[in-house]
Image (cartoon, helix red, strand yellow):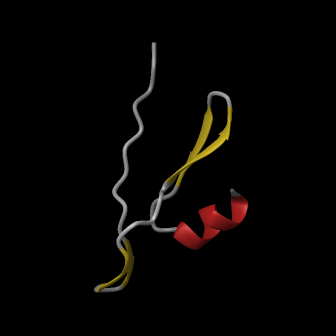
Amino acid sequence: DGVILGADTRATEGPIVCDKNCEKIHYMAPNIYCCGAGTAADTEAVT
């Protein structure tokens, strides 16, 4: 058993790409990861 996580690295504000290297999968603890979609600032604050 397993899970595969995938995400792009672009952060946008409307039609503007404001960051091309934004990590959206964050390591929290062994076997725990946090993924963000549309909430880059929120997941950055939590992790």
Quadrant of residue 20 in the image?
Answer: bottom left
Residue sitting at x 47%, y 58%? 23
Judge from the rendering whether residue 24 lies leftward or rightward of residue 6; answer left or right.
right
* Residue 1 drawn at (x, y percent): 45, 12
Number of numbered discs on residues = 0
* Residue 32 drawn at (x, y percent): 64, 35
Q: Quarter of the image for the C terminus: give it.
A: bottom right
- Residue farthest to the top, as pictured: 1
- Residue farthest to the front, as pictured: 21
- 39, above or below 47, in the image: below
Q: 19 and 46: which one is in front?
A: 19
* Residue 37 drawn at (x, y percent): 45, 60
Judge from the rendering whether residue 12 lies leftward or rightward of residue 41; answer left or right.
left
- 10, above or below 27, in the image: below
Residue sitting at x 40%, y 66%? 21
Quadrant of residue 42 in the image?
Answer: bottom right
Judge from the rendering whether residue 29 lies leftward or rightward of residue 14; answer left or right.
right
- 31, above or below 45, in the image: above
Residue sitting at x 59%, y 72%? 41
